[in-house]
Image (cartoon, rainbow, N blue to C red):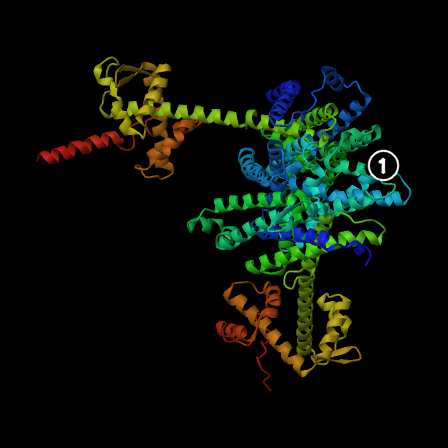
Amino acid sequence: MSGLEQWNWYLDGWIIVAGILCAISSALLGNFLVLRKMSMLGDAITHAILPGLAAAFMISDSRSSLPMFLGAVIAGILTALFTEWIRGFGKVDEGAAMGVVFTSLFALGLVMIVQAADHVDLDPGCVLYGAIELTPLDTILIAGWEIPRVVVVLSIVLLINLSFVIFFLKELKLSSFDPALATTTGFNATIIHYALMTLVAITAVASFETVGNILVVAMFIVPPAAAYMLTDRLGTMIVISAILGTVAAVTGHISAITIPHWFGYGSTSTAGMMAVAAGLLFLVAALFAPRHGIVVVFIRRLILTWKILAEDIIALMYRIEERNPQLKPDATYLREILFSHSVPTSLTLRYLTKHGQLSDANGNYELTETGRDHARQLVRSHRLWEHYLVEHAGMSAENIHKQAEKLEHFTDRQLREKLNEDTLATDQDPHGRPIPPEEKTN
Amino acid sequence: MRPFVLVLLFAMFWPECMIFAASDHSEVQSQSSITDRRIDIPEWNDWKRVFLLEDYNTRIVVFGTTLLGMAAGMIGSFALLRKRALMGDALSHATLPGIAIAFIIATGLGLDGKALPVLLVGAAVSGLLGVATILLIRNMTRLKEDAALGIVLSVFFGAGIALLGIVQQMKTGHAAGLESFIYGKTASMVASDAWLIGCAGLSCMLISILLNKELTLLCFDEGFSVSRGFPVVLLDMTLMGLVVVVTIIGLQAVGLILMISLLVIPPLAARFWTEKIVNMTMVAIILGALSGMIGSAMSAIFPNLPSGAMIVLVATAMFLFSMIFGIPRGILIRKLRRYELNRKVNRQHLLRGLYEFLEARGRLKEKQSSESTFVPLSKLLQMRSWSPAKLKKIVKRAQQEQLVVTLQEDQIRLTKAGLLEATRIVREHRLWELYLITYADVAPSKVDQDADAIEHVLEPEVIAELESLLVQQSTEGVLQSPHTIEIHQEEIKARHSSRRRST
């Protein structure tokens, strides 16, 4: 692959490590943002920490971590507070209140940073989309190892987030799904809320040098959202989101180096490509997730439609046989009665013939013995339901057909027996047609 | 009209405020160690030049941003009420890849890649793509709208950043110009751009004026507008389309990160000045125009500050002002109203307490000057959960209003006016109690509390209606209390117990 010739295990290794650390620590918290429907509050906080950062730079004149974290945490909590206030006073929805708070704070921060830019090593671009490529250059010595400062900071943040999620998993879970119950069981859901917001702010600060404070939103939200598509269990979701974040970080960096080379350019922004990689992972998850994926849901629905069509066809065949045993209907005849389209009908007919429920004599169809058994059960369900609806639900005979038509597809033998017991002993449905027996009698 | 006048006054004083703020700013900075980190305060001549629009360039920029602010204020009002504010945010972030791709394609075709119309078409296409993606994610997966917004916003922005990384390496791409779309740079606006912005903004405003009724109905009662046969989906799409257009034309001046603020802040600030949507839209238009105008003028004076941020900060200042001082809905006026209501409630409680005390002992008819009309404060304290200090305060205020007279240390007496007022209050209280008993079937022992809550806000018309409703009862003069008054009860109890003790 072109572009990888300049691969340098030292530089690129550290870049990937920083990316992974950032992705995992964000994804850990992001799960709860997504579950609590607060993704945009995460976005707002990452924007709004800017003035906190800038003030910390101006006061301390350095990029030392402590003032930065303090400034950002204050700004983050203020965002949540202000949003709440404006929503209360202005009586508007949370989104609009957020829109006011974070854009104002961001604008303030931007002006402050432009002011500080000449003196502190900081420029707005770096704040917005990070400078992960430069991280290996700024190192500190720890136990004889030269480790990039960002990696150290991110590791600490990762540890904090991990222990928060592990120790407070029960509380987080409860307050995410049922804040009222959480409050009644004796711990304060509000405190958990603000603790989460504080950690989001801290993580955003730690990440702003790697992915920048807009793209950290991608790390917060996209992997957890993808994980949410893939599983129904919180624990699994957290693990999957961390894995997806890692994959996004690695592929993001590699594609930032390689893909532009295919078009004859040098490498592009790793942070941007990390977001794109995460987006692609989400796309795959959203489309092909085993239970909730769009494609899977679509196919499942399609199969159900065809199954119902197949059942409708053989039930119709049974009724035709009942009235006129000589008539051997063809596809067009069936379609006219069922109002079905030609392609699904012919496909379903072929399926039924292949599975031995229908026999095909030059385009004219007839029920086989198995088909007749199946159809008898369906018609029995249908007519039992009609009977039941008239007798117990007090519906008039004109309206019951549609209901019974829906219910017949989901009625098994047990339910039929129950219906038979509950309705008066009769072998005629309300329209005067015989209710066929469960088993073939003669 | 008052809000408008206030806004105008505010606008007149605004530049002074800003000088003030700027000098404050530099003061704070000069306290920190690096000395030369200050904004150069421009000379008076610079101010004059900018605010009198003497430069051709400034005139263009101010014209463009003012129209932009007006259009954004108007469309934003509807978007805000329709709860689509953050959709605009995601939309504006999603325009970045479109801008970069439009530049690459146009340059590849040998056109001028930096021409504004070309870039804006790209921005519109990818912005719409972003909105479509949001709708798809929201409607077809189990994720909610917030996650959909976050995903689209960050992924599209990331793609845009990655593409900008490539654009910067292009030989033709002196692509620094593209980055101005992120933070906004009014300085790069030329006359044709201003005309484009102006025309697009005006047509947006025209459309929303024409569709005013429909959009209002859509914002407040979607179900009703469906039932009246309005094409709701089409209207919704129109509104989204207007938001898209305003966002796109605002990119150059405000930048894509902060564009949302022009759509949200002026309407939300206007919300504090009025309860009517027409007025709200008008105020939002004015505030939007002012923020555009003043903000771009500021960025002309301080050329190194990003114009988007300046426009937003101006809008924010107006928002804060509106939130605090807004007339029907601002914080101050609401606090004041509550304070006045509290005072009124306390006064009425005091008067009613005095009246009931006297009534229970049959001393109402006695001469005002006679000793028996004096009421000791300690007795009043028993009637309500007042602290002695609070009661003193209330009595003092009532004295100022000449409703009561303090005679000795702890004795007060109703004045003539006080007695009249007290009679009225007690009458209203008892009318309501009677109403509750006759019409709402509330037990007589419960009505006192209910009436207590509502007696202070009964309008004269309500009283008249109560009178006519309860006409069979004797409504002349003060009614008998339908229940025994507590202090009376206590005394009877005390008497009983003492008698029991004595026996």
**Residue B229 in view in this figure:** no
At horizontal 61% and vertical 27% (from top left) the residue drawn is B32
Relative to A28, B184 lies left or right: right
Q: Is residue A199 above or below residue B452?
A: below
Q: Is residue A313 above or below residue B186?
A: below
At horizontal 63% and vertical 38% (from top left) the residue drawn is A63
At horizontal 49% and vertical 44% (from top left) the residue drawn is A190
Relative to B119, A33 lies left or right: left
- Residue B202 drawn at (x, y percent): 76, 30
Disc 1: which chain? B
Pick the front one: A67 or B77: A67
Q: Residue furthest right?
A: B110
Q: Quadrant of residue A405?
A: bottom right
Pick the front one: B53 or B46: B46
- Residue B342 drawn at (x, y percent): 41, 26
Q: Which residue is mark 1?
A: B115
- Residue A171 drawn at (x, y percent): 48, 52
At horizontal 80% and vertical 56% (from top left) the residue drawn is A5
**Residue A245 in view in this figure:** yes
Q: Is residue A155 above or below residue B25?
A: below
Q: Residue furthest front?
A: A144
Q: Quadrant of residue A96?
A: top right
Viewport quadrant of the C terminus of chain A: bottom right
Q: Is residue A310 above or below residue B359?
A: below
Viewport quadrant of the N terminus of chain A: bottom right
User: Counting other residues with Cα less than 10 Å from the Cα at mark 1, is it few (<14), some (14-19), or many (20 or more)?
Assistant: few
